Amino acid sequence: MEFVVPFLMSMAAGLATGLGALLGVTNLARSARFFSGALGFSAGVMIYVSLVEILPEAIESVENPAAPWIAVGALFGGIVFAAVIDALVPDHINPSTTTTSDVRLLRMGVFTAIAIALHNFPEGFATFLTALTDHTLAIPIVVAIAIHNIPEGLAVAVPILHATGSVAKAFRWALLSGLAEPAGAVLGYLILAPFMTPTIFGIVFAGVGGIMVYISFSQLLPAAHNQGHPRAPLFGLFAGMAVMALSLLMLG
């Protein structure tokens, strides 16, 4: 029974992506201006969290005198990894039913969901361990993680909705990315805890940050600028960074 409350707390934080998904599948989300701003917002979220939260945490985790070099190398390693995977994915999955633009948006949304899930996995593990130690200490952490999971859910849902026209698919992918939080709690505790050294955690975490940076610059921002509203992505970018800054300040 001691595991129930920590698990439920990590579940609550993860399911906040569903709130972002609900915002992403409204009628407003179907407009080109909102879509452009939402993609910029998503990029701001991912860039800020990667460089301001993930990279410093990775540097702190790596137990080595050369920790900054190792973490930065892992960050750029994640960028290279994402670029290679991106290059290997064909542009045309089903040309008879889907346009190239739709395929790129779908790939962007799925790729974003996977990256966010990877990011959420260690978050869920950390939340679970904190709650297992002290429920009171974990409450502000859960609240802050939930707040910054909302725009992450939006980042997944919007491109998938525009690519497929399916509200169900957009919501499902966003929700699945958030469920990595409780999955990280359970699997991390049962399987990874004996093997996950702080150094390995830091390297993997920085690599995930690199993947998120790559997605932002190679897919989210270019797609945002292609919607015909050049200022919307810029405003969205700064709004996303501001929301993440607020959530991280609350987390601190």
Image: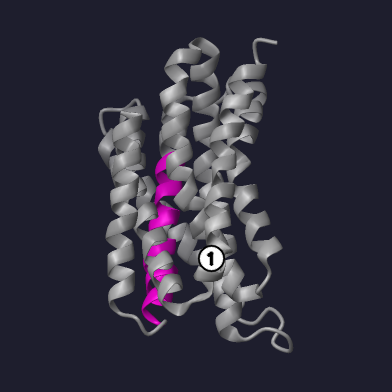
Check if residue 47 falls in the magenta segment.
no
- The answer, for residue 137, to whether it is visible in the render is yes
Does 17 sit above or below residue 80? above
Amino acid type shown at disc 1: Val
Mark 1 crowdedness (10 Å alpha carbons): few <14, some 14-19, many ≥20: many
Q: Nearer the viewer, residue 127 or 83?
A: 127
Q: Work out which residue is located at the far bottom of the displayed protein and give it.
A: 96
* 25 up-or-down from 250: above or below: below
Q: Say which residue appears at 33% left-offset and 37% top-offset.
A: 248
Position in image of residue 76 (x %, y %): 36, 54
Position of residue 116 relative to residue 134, above or below, is below
Q: In the figure, is residue 70 to the left or right of 156?
A: left
Q: Check if residue 222 falls in the magenta segment.
A: yes
Which residue is located at x 29 percent, y 34 percent? 249
Q: Which of 213/74 is in front? A: 213
Q: Is residue 192 visible?
A: no
Q: Which residue is identified by label 1?
A: 158
- Range of the magenta residues? 204-226
Q: Is residue 217 above or below residue 154?
A: below
